[in-house]
């Protein structure tokens, strides 16, 4: 699989200075964590879940979470587990299935080894588990269950803990909770692919819900938690993890609205302004601002609950030609001693030592999402992603 792999090769060549790399579920964890992109959640109760997975993969989704937790009713868990087993078997029966990375969000630690056992040979399609309301106390049993399931199945399985507990939100317990989470994920570092933020649960603790014209960063109590999580768990000194952006709750069926515009050439033949206006009228401006703020605050990838969010997340994850040029200049071997240099775009100064960590992250993102052509911007990438 690869990002923008659902569009024609000749179109990718026109859009990208450097195309996204291909990867598989067995690729190195460092690449997979950067390449998660828009991780699409789906309730495990869906009767045509296997068909949905195949359809979303064909539309550019590279990671999905099949949820047994908050997205389904408590009374439906047993049926949802059985449905998951059936749907994985259906996917496993497909000839050479082109599937996204698949994760299961569980409720209890004992579900992990039980589901791995019940999946049988179809476990080869599973990349791991999403662990809810993660703290040190609650998280260790989940991670122990995952390690046991991995040993029993012979399949590499990753964990994606969700940081969403009240202990992490409340000021009086936040520092101790973060310290415990840090100890736990460090102990199981090889198994933790990324950390996910559960901002909806944070808002729930105070009866809040952000409006469609507001980002998570406009809700100060939420922004403070994000900042502290990145401070402790997102460092670039080798101790940090990939932290993904929070869910965006609002959607409309934007693809239907955009289709008249997207029937144009890949570069829209001057209709970029119309497409951007359609985005704004479709109340997607809040999502676009939040994705940009995610990256500015050290987050990569995003939890998504609607397919219409996938293309904007991926388009804004592509590295611009200017960013890539700066990163390459900073990382040249002869720059190892430091110094300051003018950017090739002659609009900024690049300081080699302070900007090195940024450059390394940028090059990794470029490997996962590609580098846009010099004159290619977000609108063209979004149009290509939606058009497929």
Image (cartoon, grey):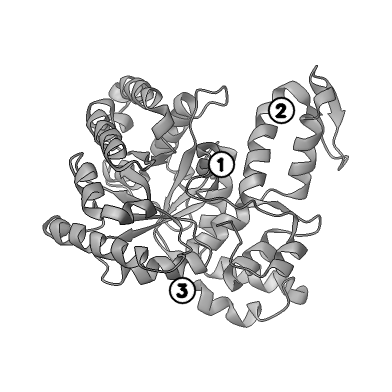
- Find residue 31 and name its label: 1
How many marks overall?
Answer: 3
Q: Badge 3 is on which residue? A: 253
Position above or below: 206 against 274: above
- For disc 3, the neighbor class at 10 Å (few under 14, some 14 to 19, many from 20) is few
Q: Quadrant of residue 266?
A: bottom right
Do the residues under discs 2 and 3 have CB atoms within 8 angstroms? no
Element assignment for label 2? helix
Residue 235, percent across and down? 53, 26
Residue 234's tag is none
Separation of residues labelled 2 and 3 (CA atoms): 40 Å
Q: Residue at x 71, y 28 (%)?
A: 355
Residue 209 is at least partly visible in this image = no
Query: In screen coordinates, is 243 left or right of 334?
Result: left
Residue that carries the numbered disc 2 in the rendered image: 355
Camera-side mark, 1 or 2: 1
């Amino acid at each position: 699989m690869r990002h923008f792999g659902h569009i024609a090769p000749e179109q990718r060549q026109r859009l990208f200075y450097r195309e996204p790399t291909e990867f598989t579920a067995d690729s190195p964890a460092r690449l997979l964590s950067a390449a998660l992109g828009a991780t699409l959640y789906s309730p495990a109760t869906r009767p045509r879940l296997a068909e949905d997975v195949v359809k979303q993969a064909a539309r550019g989704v590279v990671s999905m979470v099949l949820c047994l937790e908050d997205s389904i009713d408590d009374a439906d868990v047993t049926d949802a587990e059985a449905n998951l087993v059936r749907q994985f078997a259906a996917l496993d029966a497909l000839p050479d299935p082109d599937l996204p990375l698949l994760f299961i969000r569980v409720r209890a630690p004992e579900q992990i080894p039980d589901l791995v056992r019940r999946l049988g040979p179809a476990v080869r399609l599973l990349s791991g588990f999403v662990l809810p309301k993660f703290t040190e106390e609650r998280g260790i049993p989940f991670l122990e269950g995952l390690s046991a399931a991995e040993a029993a199945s012979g399949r590499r399985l990753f964990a994606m803990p969700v940081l969403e507990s009240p202990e992490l939100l409340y000021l009086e317990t936040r520092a101790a909770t973060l310290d415990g989470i840090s100890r736990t994920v460090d102990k199981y570092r090889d198994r933790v692919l990324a950390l996910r933020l559960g901002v909806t649960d944070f808002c729930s603790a105070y009866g809040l819900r952000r409006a469609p014209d507001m980002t998570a960063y406009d809700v100060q109590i939420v922004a403070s938690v994000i900042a502290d999580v990145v401070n402790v768990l997102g460092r670039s000194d080798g101790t940090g993890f990939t932290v993904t952006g929070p869910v965006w709750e609002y959607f409309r069926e934007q693809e239907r609205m955009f289709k008249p515009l997207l029937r144009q050439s890949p570069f829209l033949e001057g209709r970029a302004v119309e497409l951007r206006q359609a985005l704004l009228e479709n109340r997607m401006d809040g999502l676009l601002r939040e994705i940009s703020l995610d990256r500015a605050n050290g987050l990569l990838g995003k939890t998504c609950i609607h397919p219409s969010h996938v293309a904007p997340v991926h388009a804004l994850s592509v590295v611009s030609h200017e960013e890539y040029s700066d990163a390459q200049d900073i990382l040249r071997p002869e720059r190892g001693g430091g110094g300051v240099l003018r950017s090739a775009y002659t609009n900024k100064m690049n300081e080699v030592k302070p900007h090195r960590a940024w450059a390394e992250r940028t090059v990794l993102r470029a490997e996962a999402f590609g580098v846009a052509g010099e004159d290619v911007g977000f609108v063209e990438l979004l149009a290509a992603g939606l058009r497929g």
